[in-house]
Amino acid sequence: MTINMDQPAKGAPAAKKRGKKAAAKPVETESSKAKSRSQSMVLPVIPLKDMVVFPRMILPLFIARPNSLKALDEAQANNGQLALLAQVDPTHAYPEQAHLPKIGVHAQILQALRMPDGSTRIMVECRQRIRRTRWLNDEPFLQGRFVPIEEPEQSLSPEQEVLVQLMTRQFEIFIQQASQGLSEMVDHVPNLEEPGALADMIAAFLSVPVEDKQRILETLKPLQRLEAVGRLLNKSLELQAIENQINSKLKETIDQHQKEYFLREKIRAIREELGEESGAEADTYREKIAALTQPEVQKQARKELARLEKMPQMSAESGVIRTYLDTLLELPWHEEEPEAVNLKKASERLDQEHFGLDKVKDRILEYLAVQNLTQAPPKAVLCLSGPPGVGKTSLARAVAEATGRKFERIALGGVGDDAEIRGHRRTYIGALPGRLIQALQRAGTTHTVILLDELDKLTRRFSGDPASALLEVLDPEQNNAFRDHYLEVPFDLSKVFFICAANVTHTIPGPLLDRMQVLRLSGYTEAEKLQIARRHLIPRQAEQNGLKDEGLSLTQPALMHLLRRYTREAGVRELDRLIGQCFRWYARKKVEGEKVKKQISSLKQLSAILGPPRYKNGEVHSKDTVGLVNGLAWTSTGGSVLPVEVALSPGKGKLRTTGSLGEVMKESMQLALSCIQQRAKALKIAPERFQEVDIHIHVPEGAIPKDGPSAGIAISSALASVLTDRPARADVAMTGEVTLLGKVLPIGGLKEKALAAYNEGIRTVLVPQDNVADLEEIPADIRSEIKFVPVQSLEQVLKQVLR
């Protein structure tokens, strides 16, 4: 692009010397209007995309749009004159008449060259501003009537001459600083003395939006145009100064990188001569470090890499540093956006993997809904608490699959060193990061479900307390900067979805339990176990034992025998093992060529495969007995019926207890005896009776430790039965703590205890009045078959139990 300095365009005013007064602008008369109409021109129009041209410019243009090519042909057929209008909105493929401005530039075609691709390259000379008076047509090309715009002449005051000189100097500075090859323009700038011509020249070379350039073109008064251009020029100079400063800093950085590259190449050459190969290894580390986004991690990694480069390759310390760098750089430091969870699919996945557990599934789906809204795991950590075999681990795995996350399990059973959580310091030989960091290293992403299994079996030793270390891990306000002793840099655990699993919660330290939302998974009912066996256990065992297509089946009677005669558990783990044993028995018979039935349906068949039944079907004891009462217990393995036996022998009123009892249960027995002594008159027991006999209380299965206060009313009932010589009902079970005044207090684990009573054939259960609300947690089919009797006092209990 050039500017015609020597010869003004045809119709444009000649340049005036500064300080000289131009002729006054004539008053527009009817004759001048007629003259203007006589000067009007009919010109084809070529819209210019992302471009504005100014008078006195000579520049090349590439014409490719079909309508514009037709307009060009029309111009070449009529003296090569055309109108150039700016297309302000570049989104239109070809603008309509309403989208083009009224003011443009009258141009003369100097040269035209047809290109092989069908486009045409033309060289045009822009002569003067023109104004469109009307459109003539828009097909096959745009054409309109235009009149030239005369440049108004005016004298320059001293202040305006100073403005022209200032703009000239600033434009010279702009050209000298430009990196666009414009330095040859410096010699031509002083020749421009007219404000309008100077403004047009400056505007042509400024990199400003098309809208701003079009406003300059439409500013007809030269001084106003120069002032407007001056504002744009000042802004461009400021941006150019900033750009030059950035380029200077970039050049310094590039020079420094070139220096480092040269030195590293020399070091590599020296190492190759020495037979060492650690140069390529260092470069690999350096590339990985450069990709990190955490400054503190980069600083630590570069520090260790610098130490590694100074060490002999075969030194022991270099191996330690390599292991550290490998661990550090393999961790998922980059930020990831979690994907939204489809709650419907997640619900279907949970139902597919687990039968029942509706309340637990509802709580999990609520957590996932919160994750969708906050784009982060829920603040509260889930803790799945329940007996073995109820599906805690598989439920956590199903959550990971439903949310599209990786799954990692960390077994905490027996862990007694906090270094297992926080990692070992690198001063120790064989130091490793903690189990959390190792799990994330295997997963390769922080969007992981980590199951902290067997949380209730953490131990505390002299070497540390892992439960205290977990306080930081499971606290959402702290785990965003978790520091592993091995890494020595903060790691963000806030994106990890932690789920804990435990059999019981009373062994978990209070501060740790306070950070979790406990979801209790009780034992399954017979109906639920039956469905789980049909839907999950039998198909899985068939596939695992290579009998998927053999058609071996266990009928409902056979499954009921397995449930009632071979298992006594809250979950289905033992049931799964027994079903697997049946399939392995069939697999052996098949391999040996022996023909056997493909359907197991009777207890006789099960006895041949599994041996004789382990449990009797029905009640614990079928006969009402003096001194024998059915209590109910809740352990880490689920609920169970707990018989309490009391016997009298001649003596001096001593109380003897057996059955591997804890301190709390022993105190309950002493308290129960005091309650009965207080009610001796009401029970018609002679006071001297307590001094004539020794009382022996025994809880069977003495090898199993027992503790807790919930057997209080059962012990009191057994004592009352034996001291009054009245038999206790065998079809009644009970649970509840008793006070010294005979009040019955609420207990925990009511659902598990009710399931145990149901499995033993007991259909009447005494429960504390304050536990009535907990009956809603018991499945409806169990509630319909068991009569729950709420009691508030020991008198009510004895009335229901004693014959």
Image: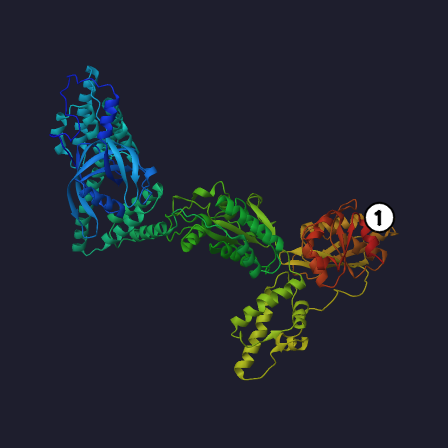
Report x, y in % for residue 619: 75, 65
Can you say which quadrant of the picture contains the C terminus? bottom right
Report x, y in % for residue 387: 61, 57
Position of 589 with respect to 298 (left or right) is right
Amino acid bearing label 1: Arg
Q: Mark 1 falls on what kind of element?
A: loop
Total marks drawn?
A: 1
Can you say which quadrant of the picture contains the N terminus? top left
Q: Is residue 242 above or below residue 568?
A: above
Query: Closest to the observer: 205 or 466?
Result: 205
Q: Quadrant of residue 248?
A: top left
Report x, y in % for residue 252: 21, 37
Position of 379 with respect to 299 (left or right) is right
Position of 388 with respect to 625 (left or right) is left
Query: Closest to the observer: 179 or 250?
Result: 179
Query: Closest to the observer: 73 or 702?
Result: 73
What residue is disc 1 on? 679
Report x, y in % for residue 85: 26, 37
Query: Closest to the observer: 550 or 730?
Result: 550
Q: Is residue 79 above or below residue 149?
A: below
- What crowding class fits label 1: few (fewer than 14 Cα within 10 Å), some (14-19), or many (20 or more)? some
Residue in the picture at 21% in, 45% down: 73
Q: Quadrant of residue 785?
A: bottom right
Q: Is residue 641 visible?
A: no
